[in-house]
Image: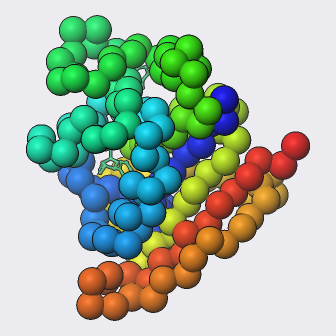
Amino acid sequence: MRVSLIAAVADNGVIGKDNDLVWSLPDDMSFFKASTQGRHVIMGRRNYESIPHKFRPLPGRPNVVMSRNADYDSEGAALVGSLTEALDLAREAGESEAFIIGGGQIYTMALDADVVDTMYITHVHGEPEGDAFFPEFDRGNWELTVIDDHPADERHKFHFTICKYDRKS
Ligand SMILES: NC(=O)c1ccc[n+]([C@@H]2O[C@H](COP(=O)([O-])OP(=O)(O)OC[C@H]3O[C@@H](n4cnc5c(N)ncnc54)[C@H](OP(=O)(O)O)[C@@H]3O)[C@@H](O)[C@H]2O)c1
């Protein structure tokens, strides 16, 4: 099973603030939806709670929520207590590509654990204030492909570049 990670990251590393996103980028959201459709999506409890009630669990995808609280009510999403458990659950369901969808704690854990094959990172060209961050990573270990470069416009406050990073073997 391929393990992928997908994130939108500002130039200063910010990914969120007050348990919410700090931008609205509809065309990047469409890329996220298309990439993860039908796939297991693995997320932290805080990220899950940041999704508006009417959109969670994210439709058309098995949702897997990580929490240390075994009694957490994940409202229809699978609940797991570790990243290993999350990946095992997807693997045992026959998944071919699982997506780690954040937030900051879960991205950091996944990169530290060295389980990620591919990262889809939307680089958002701005420096907004925030309190959740994507971890630093060594670009030398990853092969970069640019997927799309999207200018700022009336629907997108920020210019952004969607990149794919494949782990070098
Ligand atoms: N820009 C993007 O692409 C993007 C994507 C996703 C999220 N976000 C943003 O990121 C922010 C949320 O990120 P965050 O770092 O605050 O939280 P998070 O990573 O979404 O979730 C953290 C929670 O995960 C659980 N957890 C952490 N380590 C664990 C472990 N080892 N075992 C089991 N469970 C564990 C804990 O839940 P319990 O406390 O219940 O134990 C912890 O509180 C929000 O602002 C959100 O909008 C941005």
Identity of the residue drawn at 37% across and 37% down: 61
User: Split into 4 quadrants, where in the image is the C terminus?
Assistant: top right
Of the pair 65 and 57, the residue shown nearer to us? 57
Q: Residue at x 41, y 68 (%)?
A: 28
The colour scheme used here is: rainbow
Say if 42 sits above or below 134 in the image. Answer: above
Image spot of residue 142 (x, y percent): 77, 55
The answer to which image quadrant residue 55 occupies is: top left
Give the residue at the far left of this rendering. 54
Q: Residue at x 32, y 82 (%)?
A: 156
Residue 38 in percent (x, y) is at: 44, 40
Q: Which residue is painted at 39% across and 16% down in the image?
A: 80
Q: Say if 81 sits above or below 167 in the image.
A: above
Res. 99 visible in picture = yes
**In which quadrant is the N terminus drawn?**
top right
* Closer-to-camera residue (22/168): 168
Residue 128 in the image: x percent, y percent? 34, 71
Query: In this view of the protein, can residue 87 be seen by the observer?
Result: no
Farthest top residue in view? 70
Residue 42 x, y percent position in the rendering: 43, 33
Q: Quadrant of ligand 1?
A: top left
| Number of numbered discs overlaid on the protein picture | 0
